Amino acid sequence: MSFFYSNWWLLPLIITIFTGILCPAMGTVLITHKRLLQVNLISHCVLPGLALALALGVHPSIGGVISGLTGAIVAESLTNKKSENYEAVMNTILAGMLGLGVLIIPILGIRIDLEAVLFGDLLTANFGDLIRTLIAFLMFTCLITFGYEKIIYVGLDQEGASASGINVSILNLALSFTTALVIVSSMSAVGVILVIALLSTPTLLGVRKAPSLRIAMIRSSSYGLLISIIGFTISMIFNLSPGPAISVICVISLIFIKGENDN
Amino acid sequence: MQTLNAKNLTYSYSKKTQPAISKVSLEIKPGTLTALVGPNGAGKSTLLRLMQGQGAPDKGEITIDGEKLLKVRNKVALMPQRSSMNWKFPITVERLVALGQIKKSRFRKDSPFQIKELISNPKTWINKCCEVEAAMQRVGISNLAKRRLDSLSGGQQQRALLAKTLMSPSKFFLLDEPCSALDPPARDEFLKIIRQIADAGMAVFISSHDWGSSLNAYDKVVVLDKTVIAIGTPKEVQNKLDDICCLKEKNLCDCD
């Protein structure tokens, strides 16, 4: 343990590495399933749960996951992807849940470093953050190991998958739960709002021309790892906040996508 | 010979709305190629879904050789409409076709091409590979096996989807508007393939927007507009249509 205290940068680096691998892999599944708007929704929905959990003396991560999942379930019960009101309903719930979080923090009289939650504070990361990231990593690995075929089928043809006996609702719920877990786990690295960049940008790079979901995930994770380490290094050198630095690197890497598309 | 029978089917999506289909009765026999035609909103997709066991009719029943459809759902396979597919999904043609092996069972444990299956039962694994190859050969896409789905033309994509549907152990194949996005040569090629499938003893039932002489490619034609308006050989149906004003209004027939 004392080794980590003397090398203060090591724990944030390990969390950066795991987050850099995990978020793009999860993002690949979500983008290929056309569920990226749901990620945005969940990431905004975790705040009321975090606040309530702190007020009740429960670990904030548990509250965040429950709250994010609740937002996703409420959204799915009110609308679906085929509905013309889908985006409007999703964005309303997203804004409403974030607003609720901001409202209840002073009402409950709790102290939350809102900036750290929303935009990350990697340099103050502790072992709890690492364990949280590892739990999310484990959950995602289980989902992929035991549900890979089902994830492919549902992503490709939801109706056909349902007709083949796959319980699409349960699979979607498992995806939402894992997404909430990944978002909460990345809180210390990039924050619940900036995580969207790490979930989507490496995926855009990795999914192109990939012959399978598995290869797309591996490529996305590789790009994600590279982006995260570059962002982390720049933030160390210039004494910047790592979360926003990683997000800016994500935007810059979009140039490569555009360059390749032009070719 | 197994026969699929639909008797007096009525189905509404909600109690407040008019039935999507009403009192529909028809029979499908193996070895026949049947076209289901009708205007948009006629209930073609609804009928196909019911015939595949996705939902139960409000009235009437569907049986295969006297057995209720819900007990023998795996005897019917549905090829969905193009619009229900996510064509951008990162998957190769052979992998898509292999997905057709997933059985219609709630208690299914196996899935195509798992490494543990290769180790425990290599013969079954190899058989599965052969089945995939055979299905691709049947629709003429063996050379596209390693290609990504979104790199194919519309006609090739439809053939890949057909190969996936053919992987099912079913005898009855329901195809929901498979030719809707195809140009005439691709459509003719597709119809040639499904004719071969029907000639091999399968029942192929296709919903279509085709009309006029193109219906001569089918053994039987069912005209649907909420209810069955005409049924019979293409010639019989063409003759009957002279008396059907509602279809003329919807510009569906070329009998003027």
Image (spheres, coloured by chain):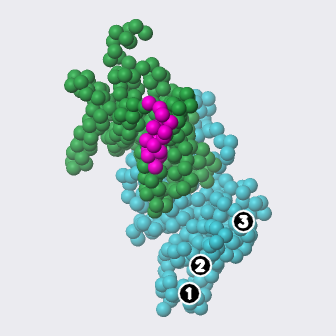
Chain colours: A green, B cyan
> Could you classify mark 3 by the number of other residues whose Cα lies within 10 Å: few (under 14), some (14-19), or many (20 or more)?
many
Chain hosting mark 2: B
Residue at the spot of label 3 = B62
Q: Is residue B250 magenta?
A: no
Q: Nearer the viewer, mark 2 or mark 3?
A: 2
Amino acid type, callout 1: Cys
For the residues bearing labels 2 and 1, Cβ distance under 8 angstroms? yes
Contact between labelled residues 3 and 2, with CB atoms less than 8 Å apart: no
User: Marks 2 and 3: same chain?
Assistant: yes
Q: Residue at coordinates 63% horizontally, 75% vertically from top-left? A: B18
Please tell me in which quadrant of the rendered image residue A215 appears.
top left
Q: Tell me the element at label 2.
A: strand
Mark 2 vs 1, N-terminal side:
2
Which residue position is annotated with label 1?
B246
Query: In the image, which residues are magenta?
Result: A96-111
Are the residues flagged by discs 1 and 3 from a single subunit?
Answer: yes
Determine the main secondary structure of the stretch shown in magenta.
helix
